């Protein structure tokens, strides 16, 4: 076999016989070179692709991580949203209870019609508070609730103040009669003493009646005296606060004791004629700031 090689440096085609050891050697070297270069190319190709593959894998891993984190955040925010929705529901229920309480107070306190408004529901459109659609829903609902609480709170403190005033002005202020069916037998002020016949300042009103007629407290208060008095016999004294005190004398029987809380209209004693008395009657006094005053100004009022 002959191999013809045409090359410039050979200055014309040259024949090499394959038997020629030089040719065999050259051919072998060439073949080895080709195979080697194939290996080298492969090696370099892998060498070049290797880092890219690694980078790609790293990026994939990071992407997976991010995805997992995102899922976590999503699950977390959905959990948070649910928790917020539940809390929102509780707040709404509380607001409803507050409003119901406000309603009852307004009604029981007989406070002006239209002055208070607790029924007004928060101005939202048809979304069940237990299932808000988004964090934005929850937020706007919370804002509305906050306003509602503010308004209810203001109204409640106003009602509290009004009721407290009412309490002082009405319940703890003597009003109405301490006896039923009796007639006034003696006025407040100067009079002739029924026993000595001399001049006497009468510090209260007398109501005549029958033995055992019930005597009632004319205002809320605390019993500060319930015992025998030389002049007024079996005597009850009730402190109503605000510098007001009432006294009920000549009773046949006392039904309360010192320290007892009484409400206006509570039965405190039974009519009698104990002490300096000429017949069954109630001697009734009202004291203001340590001085007896004419009870008439109080008795004319009646409790609604
Ligand atoms: Zn009297």
Image: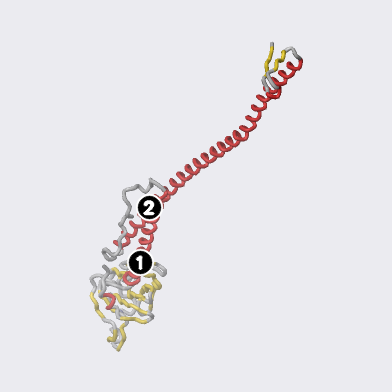
**Above or below, comparing residue 23 to residue 221 in the picture:** above
Looking at this view, name the residue that lies furthest to the front: 11
Q: Name the residue under label 2.
A: 92
Residue in view at x 57 percent, y 35 percent:
56
In terms of depth relative to the viewer, which is nearer, 9 or 297? 9
Of tags 2 and 1, the one toward the viewer is 2
- Residue 30 pos. (x, y %): 70, 21
Q: Quadrant of residue 295?
A: bottom left
Q: Mark 1 points at which residue?
A: 158
In terms of depth relative to the viewer, which is nearer, 232 or 189? 189
The answer to whether residue 120 is visible is yes
**Above or below, comparing residue 14 to residue 95 in the picture:** above
Find residue 283 and name its label: none
Residue in view at x 37 percent, y 70 percent:
221
- Residue 59 pos. (x, y %): 56, 38
Identify the coloring.
secondary structure
Give the SS element for disc 1.
helix
Q: Earlier in the sequence, mark 2 or mark 1?
A: 2
């Amino acid at each position: 076999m002959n191999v013809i090689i045409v090359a410039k440096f050979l200055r014309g085609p040259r024949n090499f016989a394959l038997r020629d050891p030089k040719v065999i050697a050259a051919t072998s070297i060439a073949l080895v070179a080709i195979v080697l270069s194939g290996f080298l190319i492969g090696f370099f190709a892998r060498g070049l692709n290797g880092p890219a593959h690694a980078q790609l894998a790293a990026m994939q891993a990071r992407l997976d991580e991010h995805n997992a984190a995102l899922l976590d955040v999503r699950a977390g925010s959905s959990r948070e949203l649910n928790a917020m929705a539940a809390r929102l529901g509780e707040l709404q229920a509380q607001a409803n209870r507050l409003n119901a309480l406000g309603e009852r107070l307004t009604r029981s306190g007989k406070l002006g019609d239209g002055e208070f408004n607790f029924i007004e529901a928060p101005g939202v459109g048809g979304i069940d508070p237990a299932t808000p659609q988004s964090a934005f829903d929850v937020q706007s609902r919370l804002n509305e609730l906050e306003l509602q609480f503010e308004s209810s709170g203001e109204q409640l403190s106003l009602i509290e103040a009004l009721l407290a005033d009412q309490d002082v002005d009405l319940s703890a202020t003597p009003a109405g009669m301490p006896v039923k069916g009796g007639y006034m037998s003696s006025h407040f002020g100067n009079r002739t003493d029924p026993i000595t016949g001399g001049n006497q300042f009468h510090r209260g009103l007398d109501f005549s009646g029958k033995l055992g007629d019930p005597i009632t407290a004319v205002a809320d208060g605390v019993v500060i005296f319930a015992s025998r008095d030389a002049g007024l016999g079996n005597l009850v004294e009730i402190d109503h606060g605000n510098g007001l005190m009432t006294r009920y004398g000549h009773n046949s029987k006392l039904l309360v004791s010192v320290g007892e809380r009484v409400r206006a209209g509570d039965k405190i004693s039974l009519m009698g004629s104990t002490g300096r008395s000429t017949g069954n009657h109630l001697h009734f006094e009202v004291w203001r700031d340590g001085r007896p005053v004419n009870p008439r100004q109080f008795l004319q009022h009646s409790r609604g």
